Image (tube, rainbow, N blue to C red):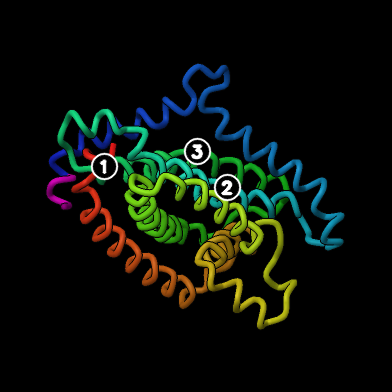
């Protein structure tokens, strides 16, 4: 599969460019929406949520933005990735290419948008006086693990969505609910230990905490927790490849 993807690498590159350009096609601000959207979302949460939590988190706006950006990458990837096979049904029926390119393009284009929007984090770190540390060197490791996790998920969901069209709506609803079980707006330390253990069953909780550790708290991520998420994500990716390969045989007929 990797050999075939390498042979079609130019198609992958052009598809990633198409995903990025298509997202902002016709908009006045274009790629600047990668900055504007998370900033507006952060502004709303920064004003409203402190009153609900009644907490005293220092530099709360910076705290939120570090959680929102990777979460936005996650939700956008799942939403777009789940429907990518259906959206590209016309091409699939006409031309042969490795179908895995479609979900891979969604995750990759989302990665580029995430990296661009990370500039916002750096600006907030400077403006809040937190600054930087050498722990930012761990950023590629966390990103790779999240990339693997998301690719594994959408390989499964995009393939199933071809046969069960309602799955797209079920998955989007589940992801919306998952937001409240992920420490995007709050710190895990708010809860008792037994609740923290439950919340950490969500791999995105570990990833969000890892981003906060290297950006906000300027310390190394919890490597044991990251290793567990990496193992889980790798297994999920392997399952995703098997499921995708099994179901892609009927894509043309179903589409």
Q: Are marks 3 and 2 in contact (CB under 8 Å)?
A: no
Q: Quadrant of the C terminus?
A: top left
Instruction: Determine the CA span between mark 3 and mark 2.
Output: 10 Å
Q: Are marks 2 and 1 in contact (CB under 8 Å)?
A: no
Whether residue 137 can be seen here: no
Q: Which residue is mark 3?
A: 116
Q: Which residue is mark 2?
A: 69
Residue at 62% over, 57% down? 177
Region rendered in magenta: 1-5
Q: In terms of secondary structure, what is the magenta stretch mainly? A: helix
- Toward the viewer: 144 or 20? 20
Q: Is residue 119 above or below residue 56?
A: above
Image location (x, y in percent) of residue 153: 39, 56
- Toward the viewer: 100 or 251? 251
**Label located before the other in sequence (1 or 3):** 1
Q: Is residue 15 above or below residue 204?
A: above
Image location (x, y in percent) of residue 1: 16, 52
Image location (x, y in percent) of residue 37: 62, 35
- Toward the viewer: 45 or 134? 45
Badge 2 local density, few (<14 within 10 Å), some, or many (20+)? many
Q: Is residue 70 above or below residue 28?
A: below
In the rendered image, residue 224 lying in the magenta stretch gets the answer no
Helix, strand or loop status at disc 2: helix
Q: Residue furthest bottom?
A: 194
Whether residue 97 can be seen here: yes
């Amino acid at each position: 599969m990797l050999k075939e993807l390498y042979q079609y690498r130019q198609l992958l590159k052009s598809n990633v460019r198409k995903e990025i350009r298509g997202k902002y096609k016709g908009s006045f601000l274009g790629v600047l929406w990668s900055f504007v959207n998370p900033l507006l979302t952060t502004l709303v949460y920064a004003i409203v949520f402190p009153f609900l939590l009644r907490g005293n988190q220092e530099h709360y706006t910076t705290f939120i933005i570090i959680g929102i950006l990777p979460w936005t990458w996650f939700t956008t990837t799942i939403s777009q990735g789940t429907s990518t096979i259906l959206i590209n049904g016309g091409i699939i029926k006409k031309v042969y290419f490795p179908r895995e390119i479609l979900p891979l393009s969604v995750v990759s284009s989302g990665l580029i948008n995430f990296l661009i929007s990370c500039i916002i984090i750096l600006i907030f770190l400077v403006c809040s006086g937190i600054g930087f540390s050498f722990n930012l060197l761990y950023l590629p490791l966390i990103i790779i693990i999240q990339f693997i996790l998301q690719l594994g998920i959408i390989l499964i969901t995009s393939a199933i969505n071809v046969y069960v069209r309602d799955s797209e709506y079920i998955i989007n609803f589940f992801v919306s609910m998952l937001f409240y079980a992920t420490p995007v707006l709050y710190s895990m330390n708010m809860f008792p230990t037994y609740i923290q253990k439950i919340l950490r069953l969500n791999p995105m909780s570990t990833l969000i905490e890892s981003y906060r550790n290297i950006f906000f708290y300027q310390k190394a991520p919890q490597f044991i927790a990251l290793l567990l998420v990496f193992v889980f994500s790798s297994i999920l990716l392997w399952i995703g490849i098997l499921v995708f390969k099994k179901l892609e045989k009927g894509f043309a007929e179903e589409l």
